[in-house]
Amino acid sequence: KKYVYLFNEGKAEMRGLLGGKGANLAEMTNIGLPVPPGMTITTEACKEYYHAGKKLPDGLLDEIKKNLAILEEKTGKKLGCIQNPLLVSVRSGAVFSMPGMMDTILNLGLNEDTLKAVVANTNNERFAYDAFRRFIQMFSDVVLEIPKHEFEILLDKQKHAQGVTFDQELTAESLRKIIDNYKALVQEKAGRPFPEDPMEQLILSIEAVFRSWNNDRAIIYRNLNKIDHDLGTAVNIQSMVFGNLGNDSGTGVAFTRNPSTGENVLYGEFLTNAQGEDVVAGIRTPRPISELKDEMPEAYEEFARTARLLEKHYKNMQDIEFTIERKKLYMLQTRNGKRTAQAAVKVAHDLVAEGMVTKKEAILMVEPAQLDQLLHRQIDPKAKVEVIAKGLPASPGAASGTVVFDADDADRLAKEGKKVLLVRTETTPDDIHGMVAAQGILTSRGGMTSHAAVVARGMGKPCVCGCEALKIDYNAKTVSVGGKLIKEGEPLSIDGSTGRVLFGVVTLKDPELSGEFMEFLEWADELKEIGVRANADTPEDALKAREFGAKGIGLTRTEHMFMAQDRLPYVQQMILAESLEDREEALSHLLPMQQGDFYGILKAMDGYPVCIRLLDPPLHEFLPNQEDLVIETTELRITGKDAKLLEEKAELLKKVRTLHEFNPMLGHRGCRLGITFPEVYDMQVRAIFNATAQLTKEGFQPHPEVEIPLTIDVTEMKFFKERIDNIAKEVMERENVQFHYTSGTMIELPRAALLADELATASDFFSFGTNDLTQTTLGFSRDDAEGKFMDDYLRAKILKENPFIVLDRKGVGKLMKLAVEGGRKTKPDLLIGICGEHGGEPSSVEFCHMIGLNFVSCSPYRVPIARLAAAQAAV
Ligand code: ADP
Ligand code: MG
Ligand code: MG
């Protein structure tokens, strides 16, 4: 087995074996770009390292040594040589990029002997000592696991002694002292001297990078991003180039386009006289890449040209790391750049316009779930705001929350339901959980490529960074800015799209969609095969849904209409009625109200189908709470004031008690209500058809679909269908108008799915209610599972995903397939859709496409996500 590949032996397609970084270093090498030579140890070797109980696989060392010899020949340098020593970086490189999650060591190969050679060869004592002290620091952190801050303390002490504030002001003498102090610290903490043998340094570093695959923050990151824990990391060993050799050297990070907006301009940051990590570490605030043009024009031009070339080569926006050593450009990394949803859509759109990719390819470039960000809220332009500072617009969207200074606090308070804003000097990978919990992130240091910025953009969280006006006091838990002192727990707002920091709470507003976004979604519509409808209960929601591209309503719930304050008394009267006459009396009041509701929705969705579900929840939901009634009647009895009221309340209590159910989810609900009280369903059906007749006469084109919930048998369905058809006939005759309607059933109980072939004889359509179908197939009550045992099931890997979020293809999906087959056997053109929460979840949409549904239906705000997911499923 081959464990080691020289950069010139690999290519981009070998990413699974070489990791993303290694595969792209190889690709860049082979297209002739200036990449410092090196080699990649495969992810395979990492996996075997773990299989063998953390032991390097046999033969790996020999292979490394063999390739090292080739590398030495290429560079004319030798590891550990005291005339011309080779220095290398040891870089982690996972298959999927995990920025900053794993470890990298620079300047490896330095020891007291090679140090002398570097001093002599560069004629730069300061540089050589600085390189060595950095190496000791990184190596000790990564390999020997001595905390970084122990070294920072020694560094600060020396800065103090020398009377300077910045690292780069330290003299060679000071750096020499620091090296000695570092070494003493290593001896003390690790109980061994710092390893002087370069080969030993190398082997220990490789093992440490393998180990870093399983450090806490890497595991959290993988869980968050659903990355397989078994992939392992590759290790890249690369000869060093130095951006810290003086002012004609530098290092930087750049995107080929703006990762925030997608605008087609080179976008990034650089520092002169700096090494690798300095740009992203947030220690010095870097300068915009455009300024490199004046500083080092030739290197800039070459970089800009290379960036364009890489973009064309990869047909995607690139995120590039580079270093300039004495005016000569070196490429150190390229990858498809992480971007906001806004940028993702714009880049995909523009690449089609520029002829670089096809519409199909463009559709695949945007993560459907990411579109959620575009539906992010903005600061209401009409709101009065007080801007107290300005930082960098690192990740768009606005956020308001109470200030917290610590990731743990953010996490805890968010779990208590509080909205918090995480404020820090900078963030590190250890703060991830706090960033997840916060509404937004605000930092005082670091640029657009700092940790906070990159991670926030990935999460779609608003973020403002590098806001240097903030004076944060972690001990006092306060931040002072713009003449204000804000304490922990007080509100603050940020606008990640502009970088503004705003005093107090501000009003946020829903976003508007760009023309590019609309056009992009139209391409999705051209490619998708499954229809997208929305769930909407009001005309406003229906209009919103149309705006987002829904072609119809897949579910209108009628119970919400019963909950309105002016209707509840009649609904209660209907429930309490002792006789049919009494009930019909109450229903006669509800009829015109329901008719008005349906009129509004059918009109808003003119020309498109509207699926209306008849009453579904158990009746007790419309009555007062039992305990409240007990208290009220007891009080009335004690005071003896209002005998009539007491009688009424006592009556109500009696009814509530008789309606009490041990398991309402499986109780008297759905079409069982229609079986017991057919007149209630009749009223709703009449209201639908009255509205339909009225609209038809007015010249509209209403398409109502009357939907029966929770059926288990075709006999039920036949019972309802006959009544629906009779009422339709009656209304058409009375109003002297013809209109179009259909009737059908939800499939939300296993029995309905099993008997779908029979149900189809009395149904024009099926709609999967996957919320109930999931509950009844798994026997999990949704409200009880979540927060009680669901997490245990996920942790124990009994279930891969929460089945209430991602459709359970294996179980629930099997029933769905059965129902589709059964239904279509009876009626080949049976219309079938899904209206559960799953209808807006990308993986579930894909499944619905696969089993041949006609449409998915989801909340209006998820319609764009479903449209894109449907297109991706089809291409
Ligand atoms: P990360 O994945 O955290 O970005 P990298 O392996 O890319 O880690 O390295 C960290 C930093 O060190 C980057 O800025 C990179 O450009 C720089 N670096 C890595 N290897 C070299 C090298 N051989 N010469 C100069 N700089 C390097
Ligand atoms: Mg790093
Ligand atoms: Mg990198």
Image (cartoon, helix red, strand yellow):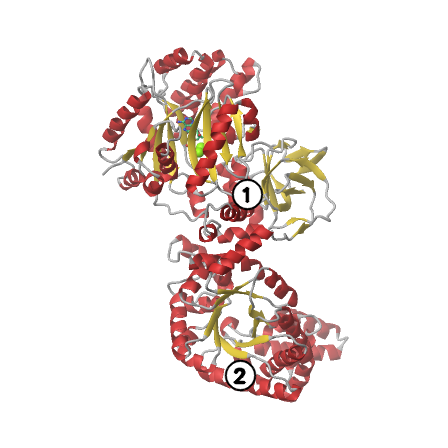
User: Which corner quadrant of the figure contains ligand 1?
Assistant: top left
**Furthest-right residue in this view:** 641
Relative to 750, is 799 above or below? above
Question: Is 31 in front, or is 702?
Answer: 31
Amino acid type assigned to the residue bearing label 2 in the image: Ile
Are there few (<14), some (14-19), or many (20+) residues within 10 Å of tag 2?
some
- Mark 2 residue element: helix
Quarter of the rendering containing residue 87: top left
Name the side, left or right, on which 652 lies relative to 522: right
In this picture, residue 712 sits left or right of residue 88: right
Task: Give percent across and percent down for residue 299.
Answer: 48, 25
> Residue 696, image x and y in percent?
64, 78
| The residue at label 1 has a CB less than 8 Å from ligand 3 | no
Instruction: Sort mark 1 into few (<14), some (14-19) or many (20+) by Cα contacts within 10 Å.
Output: many
N-terminal label among 2 and 1: 1
Indicate the quadrant containing the C terminus: top left, top right, bottom left or bottom right.
Answer: bottom left
Query: In the image, is residue 322 above or below residue 257?
Result: above
Q: Which circle marks residue 675 in the picture?
A: 2
